[in-house]
Image (cartoon, grey):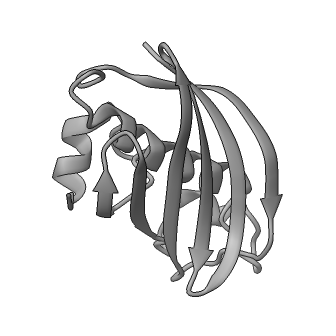
Amino acid sequence: MVLDRAGIEAVIPHRDPFVLIDSVEAMRPGHTVSATKYVDPAEAYFKGHFPGNPVMPGVMIVEAIAQAGAVCMLSTPEFSGCTAYFAGIDKVRFKRKVAPGDTLTIHVEIGRMRGRIGFGHGKAFVGDELACQADILFAIG
């Protein structure tokens, strides 16, 4: 399953300026997803993070991972039309700077589910280099 920006917005409630994935390249709904995010040099946060040394904020990278996971879960018939919320973030590690013009490739694997509470593990890469990894806990409302 491949989704463009319109397809993503049909699944998750996020809208500009807070949709942090541009496309879904591959997905097994409820199991795995691969998505991309072009890190546009015009993003507003680069004005202050940091002047002369722009870096994509780590929280935005983690949010992009979470949005990819949300698309994966909310693409299932069981959770279609719902909203996924953060319930926790664990074991976050940042391994490299993400700069304007980079493209993030995001991979998320969904782990176990307990009713409407689930666990996932996500990684964001720039090229072949790991930029961030995180375990996410989410609740579907």
**In the image, is residue 103 above or below residue 93?**
below
Q: Residue at x 73, y 62 (%)?
A: 49
Q: How many marks?
A: 0
Give the quadrant of the C terminus: top left
Q: Residue at x 46, y 44 (%)?
A: 69
Give the quadrant of the N terminus: bottom left
Horizontal side of 135 relative to 16 (left or right) equals right
Residue 72 in picture, x, y percent from top left:
37, 43
**In the image, is residue 65 above or below residue 102?**
above
Residue 8 in picture, x, y percent from top left:
26, 47
Residue 9 in picture, x, y percent from top left:
24, 42
Q: Quadrant of residue 78?
A: top left
Q: Residue at x 62, y 62 (%)?
A: 123
Horizontal side of 50 relative to 40 (left or right) equals right
Q: Quadrant of residue 130?
A: bottom right
Horizontal side of 65 relative to 96 (left or right) equals left
The one of 31 and 64 positioned closer to us in this rendering: 31
Q: Quadrant of residue 77?
A: top left
The one of 47 and 116 positioned closer to us in this rendering: 116
